[in-house]
Image: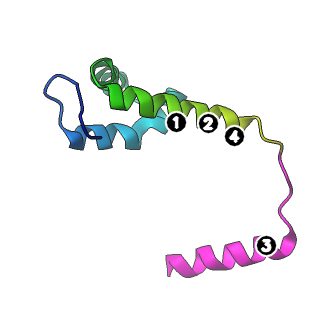
Amino acid sequence: MPDCGSRGVSEIECRQIAELLGDYLEGSLPGATRELIDFHIDGCAPCVAFLNTYRGTVDATRKLAEVPIPAELKKRLLAVLKSTRE
């Protein structure tokens, strides 16, 4: 993330943190990794903003009602997913 204000932490680390946010919010990261992220976030305003947006998005999607997928759509989606694996 540009303009990282964290003490000497590079943009690459910001991207790595962004990739780990799901696990971070679920609490499934090892303690040492979580501490590194906490330390980074303490000094990086762009990562704080990204974390807050990510958290808000996750919270909003949890409130959505489950809607059954029409059978034809499910069939087409599975076909696309299978074709991308090959």
Q: Indicate the position of residue 84 as horizontal and vertical percent values.
A: 52, 77
Q: CA distance from mark 3 to mark 2?
A: 24 Å
User: Is label 4 in a helix, a strand or a loop?
Assistant: helix
Predominant SS along the magenta part: helix
- On the image, numbered disc 3 is attached to which residue? 73
Amino acid type shown at disc 4 = Thr
Q: Over which residues does the magenta segment extend? A: 66-86
Task: Kindly check if marks 3 and 4 are in contact, taking CB atoms under 8 A apart as contact.
Answer: no
Q: Could you tell whether 39 is left or right of 75 in the image? A: left
CA gap, disc 2 to disc 4? Answer: 5 Å
Q: CA distance from mark 1 to mark 2?
A: 6 Å
Q: Is residue 5 left or right of residue 23?
A: left
Q: Point out the residue furthest to the left here.
A: 8
Q: Is residue 17 magenta?
A: no
Front disc: 3 or 1: 1
Q: Which residue is mark 1?
A: 54
The relative height of residue 12 versus residue 68 in the rendered view (above or below) is: above
| SS assignment at label 3 | helix
Question: Who's the residue at 27% across and 20% down the image?
Answer: 43
Question: What's the CA distance linking mark 1 and mark 4?
Answer: 11 Å
Mark 4 closeness class: few <14, some 14–19, many ≥20 residues within 10 Å: few
Q: Which residue is mark 2?
A: 58
Q: Position of residue 82 (x, y in %)?
A: 60, 77
Q: Secondary structure at mark 2?
A: helix
Q: Nearer the viewer, residue 69 or 10?
A: 10
- Report x, y in % for residue 10: 18, 37
Instruction: Tell which circle, 3 or 2, labels the residue nearer the N-terminal end.
Output: 2
- Give the crowd class for mark 2: few <14, some 14-19, many >=20 residues within 10 Å: few
